[in-house]
Amino acid sequence: PCDFSNNKTVYPRVLSGYILDFSLENLPKVERFYKELWPIEIKNIKNPQMIFFDFGILGFVEEAELKDNSKYKLLFRVKDKLFADILQKMSAYTARLGLSIIR
C-alpha cells in the first residue's frame, strides 16, 4: 500500500475473491478468507451481498491494466480503516504460512 500510494510499484498485488447474495449458510468455513464484509449493498445489484477475499489467491497485475475499464469495473471503494484491517488479516495469514515476504 505504501509503494502503491507513492507510485513506486509497477505490479500491485491483487487479492482475489467473490461476491454472493447474502446468506449465513454461504459463509466459508476456512480461515484463509476475509469474510467480515456482509451484508452490504452495491449500486445496481438488487439483493444485499457478501464479499469474500481469498488470501490463498494473490495475483500481480500492471497498474495500467487495473485502470482499464474494459477489464475491471470499480464497484466500490473501502475506507482506510477497512483497508488496514484487510491488509492486517492478510499479513497475519501469510505470516503463519511463512510467506511474510512476498515479492
Image (spheres, grey):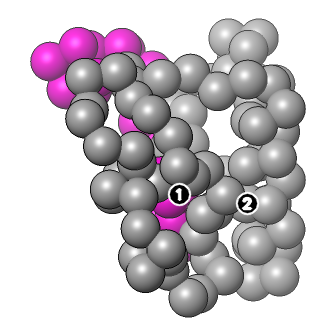
Question: What SS does tag 1 mark?
Answer: strand
Left or right? Give the position of 5 relative to 34: right
Report the magenta residues as a range: 51-73
Q: Residue at x 48, y 23 (%)?
A: 76
- Vertical placement of 79 versus 19: above or below? above
| Residue at image coords 50%, 59% | 52
Q: Label 2 near label 1: C-beta < 8 Å?
A: yes
Q: Quadrant of residue 66?
A: top left
In the image, residue 92 sits, relative to residue 46, either above or below, namely below
Task: Report the front residue among 84 and 4.
Answer: 84
Quadrant where the N terminus sits is top right
- Which residue is at 44% across, 33% downward? 41
Q: Is residue 37 left or right of residue 49?
A: right
Residue labelled with disc 2: 90
Residue type pointed to by label 2: Met
Residue 98 appears in the figure: no
Give the mark nearest the N terminus, 1 or 2. Answer: 1
Any part of residue 14 in sight: yes
Instruction: Please give the residue where the numbered disc 1 appears in the rendered image.
Output: 53
